[in-house]
């Protein structure tokens, strides 16, 4: 948590993953997604990709594609 508070993008991603899955913390998907949004806005590729997956799973296909296009442009081969 301290690394995320200090601005580490990877810490935001990892903490978001923990909250979304409930691994090691009480599950809190909105908090996890918010952490990914913060990291994605600063260029974190995996966070952007995960936001696309969340939007796709929620039926927001156009927004999912936009997230995937952005993450692909910045180097995510899975997008």
Image: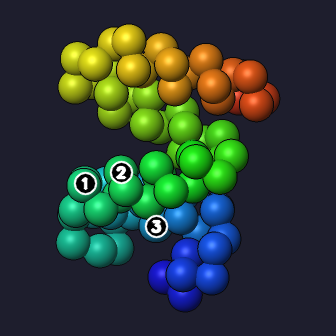
Residue 75 picture location, percent across and down: 78, 29
Expressed as whole percent of the image width and height from the top left, the position of residue 19 reads: 32, 63
Residue 34: percent from left, percent from top = 37, 56
Which quarter of the figure has residue 63?
A: top left
Decide: few, some or many residues near mark 1? Use Cα within 10 Å; few <14, some 14-19, many ≥20.
some
Picture quadrant where residue 47 is located: top right
Note whether residue 79 is visible. no
Query: Is residue 28 depicted above or below 76 in this figure?
Result: below
Mark 2 to mark 3 CA distance (whole Å)? 10 Å
Q: Is residue 24 above or below residue 33?
A: below
The residue under label 2 is 33
Determine the image quadrant of residue 13: bottom right
Q: Residue at x 55, y 21 (%)?
A: 68
Quadrant the C terminus occupies: top right
Provide the secondary structure element on which disc 3 rests.
helix
Q: Sequence-wise, which precedes: disc 2 or disc 3?
A: 3
Residue closer to the observer: 21 or 72: 72
Q: CA distance from mark 3 to mark 1?
A: 11 Å
Q: Is 55 left or right of 76, judged from the image as shown?
A: left
The reply to whether callout 1 and callout 2 are in contact (CB within 8 Å) is: yes
* Dot label at residue 29: 1
In this rendering, the answer to whether 5 lies above or below 45 is below
Q: Secondary structure at mark 1?
A: helix
Mark 3 sits on what residue?
15
Which of label 2 and label 3 is nearer to you?
2
**Which class describes the residues within 10 Å of circle 3: few (<14), some (14-19), or many (20+)?**
many
Residue 29 higher or lower than 64, as above or below: below
Residue 2 visible, this orientation: yes
């Amino acid at each position: 948590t301290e690394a995320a508070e200090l601005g580490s993008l990877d810490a935001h991603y990892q903490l978001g993953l923990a909250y979304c899955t409930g691994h090691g913390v009480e599950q809190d998907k909105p908090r996890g997604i918010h952490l990914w949004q913060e990291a994605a806005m600063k260029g974190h590729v995996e966070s952007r990709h995960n936001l696309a997956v969340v939007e796709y799973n929620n039926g927001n296909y156009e927004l999912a594609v936009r997230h995937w296009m952005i993450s692909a442009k910045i180097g995510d081969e899975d997008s």
